[in-house]
């Protein structure tokens, strides 16, 4: 597939940023082609290409004779702290999605795996150590997936809490099971951004130029031992991550 002209891509990216960051409200109309051509110092054919790129990303609807209209925001607004408390039967993604009035889904597979260099470093175990891998694809009904989330748990913990091998680990998920077993968990999370790999493009139903957030989270017990690591890959324009904290001392 040929790449779009650089000018059209630049205009599309600028408008996409305004939409994703909330500067342009859902259902708002973009300026006319003539006005956009003036603002971005481009010809109207280039503006049309830029608008088509926005439509392909699902950010606007092109209405013949009327213009381009911003789609209703599909993002899940997620509190970074939603993993730390159980609400009803849920933690994490399901809590945030339901709070926003959406119906979430999760597709889960469970298997044993060997820790590669990257994972062994984060779990603080030797390379090749057997771990339990819980892979999930999550989103809201009627829309493409929002994220993948893969969790690895050291087998010593799994032997102590066998239900972790089940697809359904019960109300509150694995962190509630850890708490019931006497573990007091603290979390460490890092966030970066990159373009998606081919397998992620297919799973998340996104294009090669749609950025994703990548989040690595480590769970430490009360002895500062790493008991679990989670890697999330989140579609940037389908998700808003919110942090809330005090000023400190």
Image (cartoon, rainbow, N blue to C red):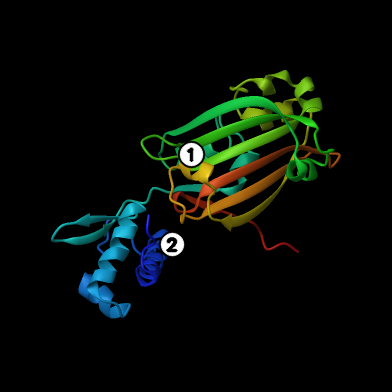
At 80% from the left and 34% from the top, the residue drawn is 128
Question: In the image, 167: left or right of 66?
Answer: right
Marks 1/2: CA distance?
A: 25 Å
Question: In the image, 137: left or right of 20?
Answer: right
Q: Secondary structure at mark 2?
A: loop
Asked where in the image residue 123 lies, by quadrant, the reply is top right
Contact between marks 1 and 2 (CB within 8 A): the answer is no
Q: Within 10 angstroms of label 2, few (less than 14), some, or many (20 or more) residues?
A: few
Q: Nearer the viewer, residue 185 or 127?
A: 127
Rendered location of residue 171, percent (x, y): 59, 25
Earlier sequence position, callout 1 versus callout 2 = 2
The answer to whether 240 is drawn above or below residue 87 in the figure is below
Q: Secondary structure at mark 1?
A: helix
The answer to whether 22 is drawn above or below residue 219 in the figure is below
Instruction: Identify the mark at residue 32; answer none if there is no mark.
Output: none
Rendered location of residue 246, percent (x, y): 66, 59
Q: Quadrant of the C terminus?
A: bottom right
Residue under label 2, please give it. Answer: 21
Q: Within 10 angstroms of label 1, few (less than 14), some, or many (20 or more) residues?
A: some
Q: Nearer the viewer, residue 42 or 78?
A: 42
Q: Nearer the viewer, residue 113 or 220?
A: 113
Residue under label 1, please give it. Answer: 203
At 57% from the left and 46% from the top, the residue drawn is 233
The answer to whether 228 is drawn above or below residue 35 in the figure is above
Q: Which residue is at the far front? A: 2
Asked where in the image residue 126 lies, by quadrant, the reply is top right
Q: Nearer the viewer, residue 204 or 151?
A: 204
Q: Quadrant of the N terminus?
A: bottom left
Camera-near label (1 vs 2) is 1
């Amino acid at each position: 597939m040929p790449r779009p002209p650089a000018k059209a891509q630049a205009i599309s990216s600028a408008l996409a940023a305004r939409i994703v960051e909330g500067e342009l409200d859902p259902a708002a109309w973009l300026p006319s082609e003539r006005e956009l051509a003036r603002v971005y110092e481009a010809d109207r054919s280039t503006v049309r290409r830029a608008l088509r790129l926005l439509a392909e990303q699902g950010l606007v609807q092109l209405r013949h004779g009327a213009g381009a209209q911003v789609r209703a925001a599909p993002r899940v607004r997620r509190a970074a702290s939603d993993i730390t408390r159980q609400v009803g039967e849920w933690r994490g993604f399901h809590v945030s999605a339901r709070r926003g009035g959406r119906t979430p889904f999760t597709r889960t597979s469970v298997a044993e795996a060997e820790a590669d260099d990257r994972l062994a470093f984060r779990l603080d175990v030797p390379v090749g150590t057997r771990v339990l891998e819980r892979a999930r694809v999550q989103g809201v009904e009627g829309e493409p997936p929002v994220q993948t989330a893969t969790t690895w748990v050291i087998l010593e913990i799994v032997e102590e809490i066998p239900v972790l091998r089940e697809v359904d680990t019960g109300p509150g998920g694995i962190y509630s099971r850890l708490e019931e077993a006497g573990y007091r968990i603290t979390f460490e999370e890092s966030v970066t951004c990159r373009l998606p790999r081919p397998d992620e493009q297919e799973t998340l139903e996104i294009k090669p130029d749609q950025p994703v957030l990548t989040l690595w989270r480590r769970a430490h017990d009360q002895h500062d031992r790493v008991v679990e690591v989670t890697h999330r890959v989140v579609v940037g324009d389908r998700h808003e991550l919110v942090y809330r904290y005090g000023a400190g001392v």
